[in-house]
Amino acid sequence: MSNPPTIRETEIVLMVADGLSSKMIADKLSISQNTVITHIENIKRKTGTVNTPNLVYYLTKHGFI
């Protein structure tokens, strides 16, 4: 990964790994659902993953979660 995830991206991806939807994450963090989706897309771009399950697998395999 060329650019490390931000603190917020890490926080969000951990919630995704716990099975929370983008709506649930947005409500929990008091941010918009679009912001959550943007963070998820940014971390997928940084990791070269194409979907959320692939992202969670990548992060688990590389010791991020």
Image (cartoon, rainbow, N blue to C red):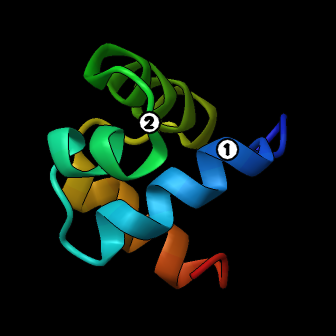
For this orientation, the residue located farthest to the right is: 3
Q: Residue at coordinates 83% horizontally, 45% vertically from top-left?
A: 4
Few, some or many C-alpha atoms within 10 Å of disc 2 (few <14, some 14-19, many ≥20)?
A: few
Q: Residue at coordinates 66% horizontally, 84% vertically from top-left?
A: 63
Quarter of the image for residue 46 reads top right
Quarter of the image for residue 2 reads top right
Few, some or many C-alpha atoms within 10 Å of disc 1 (few <14, some 14-19, many ≥20)?
A: few
Residue 3, position as x, y percentages in the image: 84, 35
The amino acid on which the numbered mark 2 sits, given as a three-letter code, is: Ser
Q: Residue under circle 1? A: 8
Q: Residue at coordinates 50% horizontally, 37% vertically from top-left?
A: 48
Q: Quadrant of the C terminus?
A: bottom right
Q: Residue at coordinates 17% horizontally, 39% vertically from top-left?
A: 23
Q: CA distance from mark 2 to mark 1?
A: 13 Å
Q: Secondary structure at mark 1?
A: helix
Q: Nearer the viewer, residue 36 or 55?
A: 36
Disc 2 and disc 1 in contact, CB within 8 angstroms:
no
Residue 64, position as x, y percentages in the image: 66, 76
Q: Secondary structure at mark 2?
A: loop
Q: Nearer the viewer, residue 28 or 62?
A: 28
Q: Nearer the viewer, residue 47 or 29?
A: 29
Mark 2 or 1, nearer chain start: 1
Name the side, left or right, on which 41 lies relative to 59: left
In the image, is residue 9 above or below residue 64? above
The amino acid on which the numbered mark 1 sits, given as a three-letter code, is: Arg
In the image, is residue 59 above or below residue 46? below
In the image, is residue 13 above or below residue 1? below
Q: Residue under circle 2? A: 30
Q: Nearer the viewer, residue 3 or 13?
A: 13
Residue 7, position as x, y percentages in the image: 77, 50
